[in-house]
Amino acid sequence: MDDTPLSTDDTGASDDVLMPGLDLPSTAPDPGYQVLARKYRPSKFEDLIGQEPMVRTLTNAFAAGRIAHAYMLTGVRGIGKTTTARLIARALNYANDEVDGPSMDLNFPGVHCEAIARSAHVDVMEMDAASRTGVGDIREILEGVRYAPVSARYKVYIIDEVHMLSTSAFNALLKTLEEPPEHAKFIFATTEIRKVPVTVLSRCQRFDLKRIDREVLTDHLDRICRLENAQVDREGLSLIARAAEGSVRDALSLLDQAIVQGSEEDGPVSAPQIRDMLGLADRARVLDLLEEALTGETAKALDELASLYDAGGDPVVITRDLLDFVHALSRVKAAGAGADLGEAADTVERLARLADAQSLGQLTRLWKILLTGLDDVRNAPDPLAAADMTVLRLAAAASLPGPEEAARILAGHPASPAAPSGGEAPGKPEPASMAPADHFADTAPHPTAPSPAPSSGPSAAVFEPVSPPDRTQPEGEVPMDGPATFEALIELLREKRDIALQTDVERYVRPAGFKPGSFTYQPEPDCPPDLGQRLAKRLLEWTGARWAILASGDAKGGETWSERRKRLEAERLEQARRDPAVAEALRLFPGAEILAVRDAVSAEDGKDETSTEKRA
């Protein structure tokens, strides 16, 4: 057998392949499937989406013959910088049977277009600065730039990720970049424009390729789906566009992955399938979570967060969605319901309702809380626990008055009442001026008993109940319904039989200032963080007015209601010990002690009489 190798011609093809009648299998590799990001790479300037300002500038420059020698393209990854650089190289070297000069009209491929598009043209050199960063690599360019092009009109040097070049490489490039030969053009691309020296930037025409708008990118994905005969829900394409963050390449890569999520039998690829693929939480449920947190339903909010996590939602993504919604709320509050939010109509309606209940200052505070919480979720060993704490902080902050309202309260002005909801609120408590003078007969001393002398210790004057304000309202001030004193508030809690809230208020609240519509208190160290929120919610239900409840650690509050009750009981015991009859009984029964002082009702006139229990 002859082992002599087959001879080849200049094209590299075997002689046997060219023999007639010989049917040999082709040795060319099967190109296989081409990903969408490569298959639908723009082949002319009209195919670039979202970059109309750059295309218009280049078109006018080429038409006027004012073609720069260096261009700097900057933008996020996948926005089309390298593709645009190749299109500019094709436009510079465009030539066909009818046109022999630079042209932006690439609808009919020129003699050099196909080779430039494949990065195979001898006069168009592409260099990746990420892997060739040294001055030696730039020196190769500088040595070859002085020679005329081989076949094209210009020598074009495309340097991608130019910010990765070393300082010495940039310095070596400066002189040639400032005064290049007439046949040389430079096109730079970078994602980090701030890392490029200003001396280089000042020698280039700069074009900032902007992120593609979500709707524009969604329309682009829809067109590609029709070309590929793929069926994907419009909502799913919007999710992909949102996840791509304005990057066309990222969007096409995700679309490649999304198309195979369904089959012809299953029908179109649905939004939930794409949401599962992306690991996204349902945005409608995230909005439910935000609404529950802002309305004081903390338990439901935590349950919703856990449910989203169990369904595959990433705590980081959920927190970012919350940030997006708070940002949308702020825009609605500042610009009105007509603000461009890029959301569905029902979502915009819900956001408008939530924005009505918050001030712009409150929304700014919620934004800062979520921004800090996002860092916590990213860095915490347990992201779900960090997300839980972020939701709790969000709920606690939502119950506080806004910065403007807090400033009014601290300045001694009453809080602004809520807008009337129409009709009188059910279960409205009796006005404070009609309440009995003594609300707590079971703990207060007998009215006929002499009052004990005030003590000089600090506990004697700690609690100073605020007297009801004058019912004559100053001009321009809106009257408020509900309790007018802290004692009336405690009485209201007893009437409504909200035992848990009453107990917390009595144990953990040190009242610092009480006015109709506003209440400032100093919380005890173990005070529940949502106490103010719960109290404000109940007062809104019972009085129909929005109360500003401010918990301030800097406020100098008085004694708690529990401390006051204990003090009064101690004073009654001391008063009973000084009673002559009780003192005589204690003398006759050595070792006896007074357990309690009770008010008894006289059988004759129904008046209260104080009785004393003793234990031997």
Image (spheres, rainbow, N blue to C red):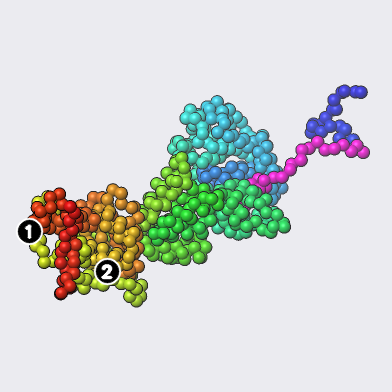
- Earlier residue among tags 2 and 1: 2
At horizontal 56% and vertical 54% (from top left) the residue drawn is 239
Q: Secondary structure at mark 2?
A: loop
Labels 2 and 1 touching (C-beta < 8 A): no
How many numbered circles are shown?
2
User: Which of the two discs, 2 and 1, sits closer to the camera?
Assistant: 1
Q: State the separation of the CA atoms marked 2 and 1.
A: 44 Å
Range drawn in magenta = 21-48
Residue 265 higher or lower than 20, as above or below: below
Q: Which residue is mark 2?
A: 482
Which x, y percent locates residue 586?
A: 11, 54
Q: Amino acid at mark 2?
A: Gly
Residue 434 higher or lower than 42, as above or below: below
At horizontal 11% and vertical 66% (from top left) the residue drawn is 448
In the visual, does 479 lie left or right of 529? Answer: left
The residue nearer to you, when weighing 614 against 202, is 614
The residue nearer to you, when weighing 445 against 32, is 445
